[in-house]
Image: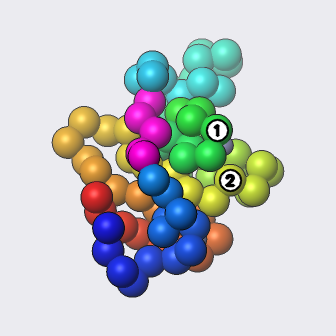
Amino acid sequence: MATEVCIHINEIGEIKQSEQRVCEECVKTGDRWVHLRTCQQCGGTRCCDSSPNKHASKHARASGHPVIASAERGERWLYCYPDDAFAEY
Ligand SMILES: [Zn+2]
Ligand SMILES: [Zn+2]
Ligand SMILES: [Zn+2]
């Protein structure tokens, strides 16, 4: 793990991966998404800020869960919303 990251990313041990490759909010409403992100606190997978509904960042603000991992194939990185910190793993 890189050293120049925030305390939230440093606290992450095992990376939570998405169980289903869908945004759990968009599937309820039939909306579309662009990329998927998995919350590292509760393990929920939601859509990125390029998606119309931006569920991942809405969830982070509403819940206080700071760190997401990309749920896209081949991408191995973490992002912390409150600190705007990024780390590859
Ligand atoms: Zn942080
Ligand atoms: Zn969504
Ligand atoms: Zn969460």
How crowded pointer 2 is (Cα within 10 Å; few <14, some 14-19, many 20+) is rated as some
Answer few, some or many: residues within 10 Å of disc 1's Cα (few below 14, many 20 plus, some between 14 and 19).
few
What residue would you read off at disc 2?
Answer: 65
Residue at x 55% of width, y 47% of height = 40
| Amino acid residing under circle 2 | His
The region drawn magenta spans 14-18
Q: Would you say residue 52 is visible in this rendering?
A: no
Where residue 43 sits: x, y (%)? Answer: 57, 35
Q: How many marks?
A: 2
Work out whether residue 63 or residue 23 is closer to the camera in this orientation and state it. 63
Query: Does 61 sit left or right of 85 as displayed?
Result: right
* Residue positioned 32% across, 67% down in the render: 1
Tell me the quadrant of ligand 3. Answer: top right
| Figure check: 87 above or below 83 | above
Q: In the image, residue 44 lies at what x, y percent?
A: 59, 33
- Residue lying at the far left in this picture: please name it: 74
Q: Is 21 part of what is drawn in magenta?
A: no
Say if disc 1 is inside 8 Å of ligand 3. yes
Q: Which residue is mark 1?
A: 42
Magenta residue check for 17 = yes
Asked if residue 18 can be seen in this view, the reply is yes
Q: Where on the picture, by quarter, is residue 20?
A: top left
